[in-house]
Image (cartoon, rainbow, N blue to C red):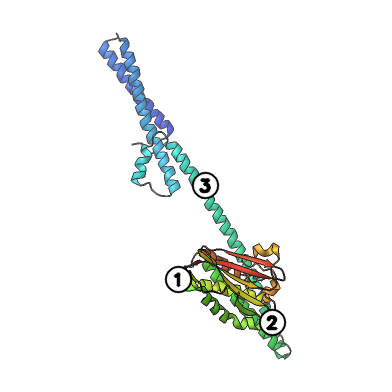
Amino acid sequence: MLKNPTPQLIALLSALWVTLAVLALDAGALFGFQWATPAWFFVVQVILVFMCAFIVFFYYLRKYIYRKIKLIYKTIHQQKLRPEEKSSSVDMQTDIIDDVEREVAIWADNQAKEIQNLRNWQEYRRRFLGDISHELKTPIFNIQGYLETLLDGGLYDPTINATYLERAVKNVERLNTIVEDLEVISRLESGELILEMQNFDIRTLADEVFEELDMKAAERNIKLGFKTGADQHFKVRADRESIRQVMINLVNNSIKYGNEGGSTKVGFYDMDRNILVEIADNGIGIPPEQISHVFERFYRVDKSRSRERGGSGLGLSIVKHIIEAHHQTINVRSTLQLGSTFGFTLAKA
Ligand code: ADP
């Protein structure tokens, strides 16, 4: 009936209805009692006017409040109310305002959280883009330098031509590593990684990783092996390919940051429901104040050493993502000049 009532319109209509009721009663009295109105009539009139006023006010107010509240609900739920929600809103007579207040407070809270999330994302993206361009700049700049020097006559200088070409290739390889790792990390961070959980022997996987990194270790004369007494075959349940990536990154780091002629030792420890896998080296170690940062992307303790060894600065953040996707934990212990031990847990099969 009233499509968009205003409080004034409601008050006007209510007043009109009540006035009409009083008029009707008075007209009845005028004709019924011919000026000799008995006292009980006033009592009845008061009661009737009160009831009439109550019904009219209540009817219009409820209609008005419901209409407004429906709008609020629609806004906060961003959809039309379902019939059952409508009727329950109409039936809520006494505490409807309280309910709406509560819902609006929850909604406002959620909105605030969402806005904070979006802000964090924006900040994250801004930093990520900054980091990436910074990371890509160095190898591109190097490649440009080597190629330009070669073009400016260096190509015919036997003392530098082969070396500069080799260095340019090395920088292209670095670019490649960064881009590949970026692909992995963006897949991990966008939640695209779907874990294919399976049961497998972690010791066999470690053997495969050793085999893959054998040459690299040999170049630095580093021995890859197992900790004595901690080299059992354990069946774990995880995504084999991702855990392979984790082990490769950790063993690879132990070679990169290990001392020439040192050793990398892998150990497995039974921890009730989980298996703890540890990869320990006796290399350069990490300063205590920097330990908590090594899992951040592009964080490097020793930038030149990392770059020289072809690191993208993303290896450990990839490792952390994968382990967290498995709902497991990773930690690191390290002492400068003595070495580092990275340990992560996996669920037993
Ligand atoms: P990078 O590509 O630089 O190796 P990572 O994310 O794998 O990137 O590692 C981050 C940093 O943590 C490295 O730059 C290095 O400074 C430090 N780090 C990682 N593993 C070791 C290790 N086994 N011993 C000493 N330092 C390490």
Task: Report which residue position mark 1 lands on.
Answer: 198
Residue drawn at 36 percent across, 40 percent down: 88
Within-10-Å neighbours for mark 3: few <14, some 14–19, many 20+:
few
Provide the secondary structure element on which disc 3 rests.
helix
- Can residue 13 be spotted in the picture? no
Residue annotated with mark 2: 146
Q: Residue at 70% x, 88% y: name it.
A: 161
Q: Quadrant of the N terminus?
A: top left
Q: What x and y, as percent, mark residue 85? A: 37, 44
Residue 201: percent from left, percent from top: 49, 74
The quadrant where residue 211 appears: bottom right
On the image, the x and y values in percent for residue 315 come to 60, 71
Helix, strand or loop under label 1: strand
Q: Residue 53 versus residue 264: which sits nearer the camera? A: 264
Label 2 Cα neighbours within 10 Å, binned few <14 / some 14-19 / many ≥20? many
Q: Residue at x 42, y 44 (%)?
A: 73
